[in-house]
Every structure is written in structure tokens, then in C-alpha cells.
Amino acid sequence: MNPSEERVSDLSGTALTRLLSLYYWKRWLWAFVRFILIVGLSFVILYPILKKISTAIKDRTDLYSPIVVWIPENLSLDNFMYAIRTMDYWNTLLNTSFLASMTTVLTACSCALAGYGFARLKFKGSNLLFACVILTILVPPTTILIPMYLNLKDFTLLGLIPLFNGGRSVNLLNTYWPFILTSIFGISYKAGLFIFIFRQFFRGIPKEVEEAAYVDGASVTRTFTWIMLPNAIPAILTVCLFSFVWQWNDSFFTTTYLTSAKVMSTQLSSLPFNLQIALSGTAGRQDPFYLDMVQDTGTLLAILPLILIYLFVQRYFVESVERTGVVG
């Protein structure tokens, strides 16, 4: 056997060994499983969005066309025009952005203070109190809806307001005050999770950083403001993004406390009824399939700002989540 034939024989033997290797097959099997998972998750996430985009650009006549499934036969922007006009979209967008931004800033501030207190300031009963905070993550928000609603409807601030208001309480419903108060006092939606994120992040910062500040004469407040907060930028970004998105998408508390304000959740819930009035002048019967089409268009308009925001901040969001230890 000449040298070239021996080289071919060795290569063939190496290839056969690799094919028979268990590690080789396990690696390719895991790659195939990951591919299936990624494709499946992408389909689950993207399918509703692509379906709504396809529906939004359809003409009304395409509803009953047997050949139209995804790509419309007649492109039209009438659905966007009806949804924007019926929802008063630009005013609604401004109100929702203001509400989400306000609650995000207040929630981040209050939860950062609470998280730092649980991480560094040890006091009697701190572990029990933190366990109660974790418990709020597990408790469904519906369990506290009725007492919260009654308290905000007849708000007395521990009996102090009637002393200066002629014995009358204050009704805070249909105002931004329910969201302001719950955000300031760290009892807003998912506040327990945000406190946990800040606590874990502050515990990961070396204590020597704070001790050096104390040696230089800095107080606890100054150390927290000038030393700890700048180092907690990843946690702040994570909490702000989560809080903004959850408040934007919230329909449970928003429709309960703000029944007359023009925000996305209330406008989407009343869109079919308002559209019937806009199309016929009365709340008479309209084509239900066309109403669903405009409803899908309104939903697409509601989530479109979040998609645009995520496209610009996705890199910072992923980095922040990884550094806070929420995943990985």
C-alpha cells in the first residue's frame, strides 16, 4: 500500500470513528433540539404580531375572499385610520406614556431604597419583613383589589384628611393618585420582584466600597446616593424596563382606577363599541368580523411603541438582566 492509500485509509477510519462516537451524536442531537426550540419559540412570539400586521393592512373586501390568507389582495390603511380616530390615538399615547413613565420613576426610587435597606441595614425583624415582601410576589393582585378600591374611594390617610376637610374623605378614583401612592410606597404592581432584584444586586457589591465612603465621613444617605446608585445602573435599567412595560400593558388596575381616562387599556376595551357608533351613528349591529379587524389594528398600534423601544434598547436590556442575576 502506497503512502497516499494509507492516508486515505486513516482519514476514512477517523471519519468512521467520529460517526460512531457517542459525543458526536449527542452534540448534533443537542444542536437539533436547540434549533427546534428556537424555531418554536419564535413562531409562538412572532405569529400573533405577523397575523395582526397582515390583518391591519387588509381591505374590508378581503375578509370574505377565499384566496386571501396572509397577503392581502387589496392593500389598505383604512383600518389604521379608523382605529386612530376612534381611540383618539395620539392623545391616548401621550397619556399612557406619561402614566407609565411616572410610575416607573417612582417605583424604581422606592424599590431601590427598600432593596438597599434589606441588603445592608440589618435590624430586628428584617428577615421576616423581607419574607413578607417575597410573599407579595406569590399573592395574586386580585386578592387585595377590593380593600384597595374601597380605601382609595374613601381615602382618609389614617383619619387625617377628614380633620381638615370638614369630616369628608377624598375620592382618588379616576385620577393618577392611586398609581402615585402605590409607586411611592413600594406597593405597586410587581414591586416585590423589583425590591428583590435591587436587594440581590446591592448584596453583590463589595462592602469595602461603602466602608471607604464611611471612612471619608459620608453618611448612609450620601453613600447610597453617590456610591451605590451609580454602581446599580444595570439593576435600575432592568427595573425601569420591566416596570414601564408592565404598566403599559396593565389592564387590570388601570381599568379599575381609571375608568374615564384615555389610556391604552381603556381605549382598547371600548374600541368595538365606539367603532360601532362611529360607523353607524348608533350602537347598532355591525359586521363582527370587520370589528375584529379594527380591534386587531388597535392592538397593533398599542404594542407598536413597545416594539420600537425594544429595538433601540435591547442590547442594554439583555446586559442589564444578565448583570442583575435575574437569569443565567
Image (tube, grey):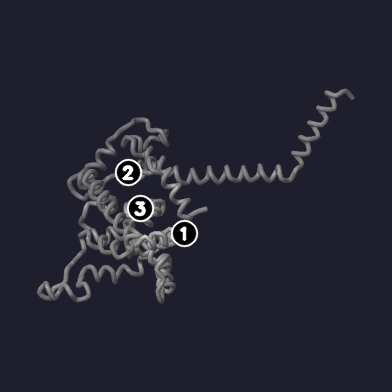
Amino acid on which disc 3 is placed? Cys
x, y percent for residue 202: 43, 60
Q: At 45% across and 60% down in the image, what residue appears?
A: 208
Q: Residue furthest right?
A: 1
Chain-order first, disc 1 or disc 2: 1
**Viewer-proximal residue among 126 and 35:** 126
Circle 1 residues within 10 Å: few <14, some 14–19, many ≥20 = few
Q: At 22% across and 75% down in the image, what residue appears?
A: 158
Q: Give the SS element for disc 1.
A: loop
> Circles 1 and 2: CB distance less than 8 Å?
no
Q: Quadrant of residue 173?
A: bottom left
Q: Is residue 75 left or right of residue 180?
A: right
x, y percent for residue 304: 34, 42
x, y percent for residue 306: 35, 45
Q: At 32% across and 35% down in the image, what residue appears?
A: 59
The residue that label 2 is drawn on is 305
Q: Is residue 20 left or right of residue 77?
A: right
In the image, residue 247 above or below residue 87: below
Q: Quadrant of residue 136?
A: bottom left
The residue that label 1 is drawn on is 206
Q: Quadrant of the N terminus?
A: top right
**Viewer-proximal residue among 200 and 80:** 200
**Viewer-proximal residue among 224 and 168:** 224
Q: Give the SS element for disc 3.
A: helix
The residue that label 3 is drawn on is 240
Amino acid on which disc 1 is placed? Pro
Spatial separation of the CA atoms under disc 1 and disc 2: 38 Å
Chain-order first, disc 2 or disc 3: 3
